[in-house]
Image (cartoon, helix red, strand yellow):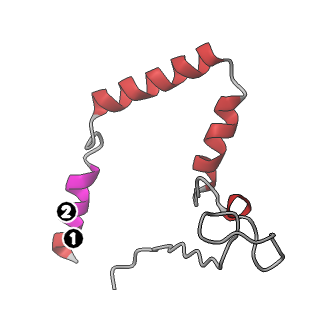
Amino acid sequence: MTGRDIEVLYVRVGPVTGIATIWRPPSWLQPRATTLAQPVVVPYLPHALLPVVTSLMPRWARDAVISRIVVELSRKGPNAEGEIKKARRRRRWE
């Protein structure tokens, strides 16, 4: 047991209509494919809210903020705080 929380997203769907192989009028148990389909699933609320917040900003402001974030991330690199090394040290002692 590692003591880590893992969330699993499972999506179970049934038959749909409105596609080339199945064309019937939609019903309660068989909706249109476009009704059922969702382009994106974001399980973490702050990540889901980010596009909403940025869509309210003027384009120039949104571009400036995103550019600043990308520059900061590229300066820091993937191991900016030494988190990877800390995690490896912890694993050795577990």
Picture coordinates of residue 59 (x, y %)?
63, 18
The vertical placement of 93 against 63, above or below, is below
Give the residue at x 24% y 54%.
84
Residue 40 or 87: which is nearer the viewer? 40
Asked whether disc 1 touches disc 2, contact meaning CB atoms under 8 Å apart, the reply is yes
The CA distance from mark 1 to mark 2 is 5 Å
Residue found farthest to the right: 28
The vertical placement of 47 against 58, above or below, is below
Secondary structure predominantly adopted by residues drawn in magenta? helix
Quadrant of the rendered image containing residue 26: bottom right
Task: Name the element at disc 1.
Answer: helix
- Residue at the disc numbered 1: 91
User: Going by the image, does 2 lie left or right of 93?
Assistant: right
User: Going by the image, does 28 lie left or right of 59?
Assistant: right
- Amino acid residing under circle 2: Arg
- Residue at the disc numbered 2: 88
- Amino acid residing under circle 1: Arg
Picture coordinates of residue 62 (x, y %)?
59, 22
Q: Is residue 54 magenta?
A: no
Residue 30 or 77: which is nearer the viewer? 30
Task: Name the element at disc 2.
Answer: helix
Picture coordinates of residue 71 (x, y %)?
37, 23
User: Going by the image, does 78 lie left or right of 35?
Assistant: left
Task: Check disc 1: other Cα within 10 Å, few if <14, some if 14-19, many if 20+.
Answer: few
Which residue range is magenta in the image? 83-90
Picture coordinates of residue 94 (x, y %)?
22, 78
Give the residue at x 54% y 72%.
9
